[in-house]
Amino acid sequence: LGDATNITGGIRYTSDVASGVGAPLRIFFDTPNVPRYSCSNPAFVLDSGVAPTSAEIIAKASDPQRLNEGFYFQFGIACERKGSFVEAAQHFQKAIELKPDFAPALNYLGYMWAERGENLHEARRLIERAVKLDPKNAAYLDSLGWVLFKLNKPHEALDYLLKAVEYSDEPDATLYDHLGDIYATLNQRDKAE
């Protein structure tokens, strides 16, 4: 009979209309000027062989202009948070395809891969592009430092992490965690604590 979507307390639920059973899909993320969507199973396969999600089908039918880099970026975030990393990567890559200089998607995909220890050289390339677009962005500098650390280049990584600390508006636990890991690897334990 299909599924229905409702929103309660900032969490989007979908439920099977027939059974009324609902399951939370994701919590909304605050990204200015970017529409919010959630991961869902494909409803059907397009002629291209690509299985669209329900949100893509609805957006295409109601407002095709919404199928932009922001749509796919938010979709990628929702999928990554859900643990659907392959699907998340596909959505981030689509966002980058639509807007090659979309720094948030370049960074998010690169950092996701770095965190997982996957595609590290490609992750570095993506994050370097984001840093080139926004060289004082602390999150992007942290990501670049982290991927360098994962590539066993702790000396290079340290430079970017220190710049990230310098440009950060407020203390960031992840940034300091990364910095501590790098100091520990460099046997500078006094600074790691």
Image: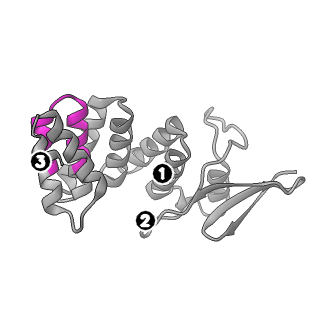
Mark 3 surroundings within 10 Å by alpha-carbon count, few (fewer than 14), some (14 through 19), many (20 or more): few
Q: Are marks 1 and 2 in contact (CB under 8 Å)?
A: yes
Q: Amino acid at mark 1?
A: Ile
The quadrant where residue 134 appears: bottom left
Residue 130 shows in the view: no
> Who is closer to the viewer here, 83 or 185?
185
Amino acid type shown at disc 2: Thr
Residue at the image position 49 percent from the left and 48 percent from the top: 76
Q: Tag 3's secondary structure?
A: helix
Residue 63, label in figure: none
Pointer 2 local density, CA inside 10 Å: few below 14, some 14–19, many at least 20: few
Q: Which mark is residue 31?
A: 2
Q: Residue at x 51, y 48 (%)?
A: 81
Q: Is residue 63 left or right of residue 185?
A: right
Q: Which residues are magenta?
A: 142-161
Relative placement, left or right, of 124 versus 40 is left
Q: Closer to the observer: label 2 or label 3?
A: 3
Within the magenta stretch, is there residue 151? yes
Percent coordinates x, y for residue 165 in the rendering = 16, 58
Quarter assignment of residue 33: bottom left
Note whether 169 is above or below 78 in the view shown.
Answer: below
Of marks 2 and 3, which one's residue comes earlier in the chain?
A: 2
Q: Nearer the viewer, residue 61 or 192?
A: 192
Residue 66 lies, in percent from the top left, at 54, 61
For the residues marked 3 and 1, what is the alpha-carbon distance in whole angstroms? Answer: 33 Å
The x and y percentages for residue 24 are 67, 56
| Residue located beneath label 1 in the image | 77
Q: Which residue is mark 3?
A: 191
Answer yes or no: is residue 87 visible.
yes
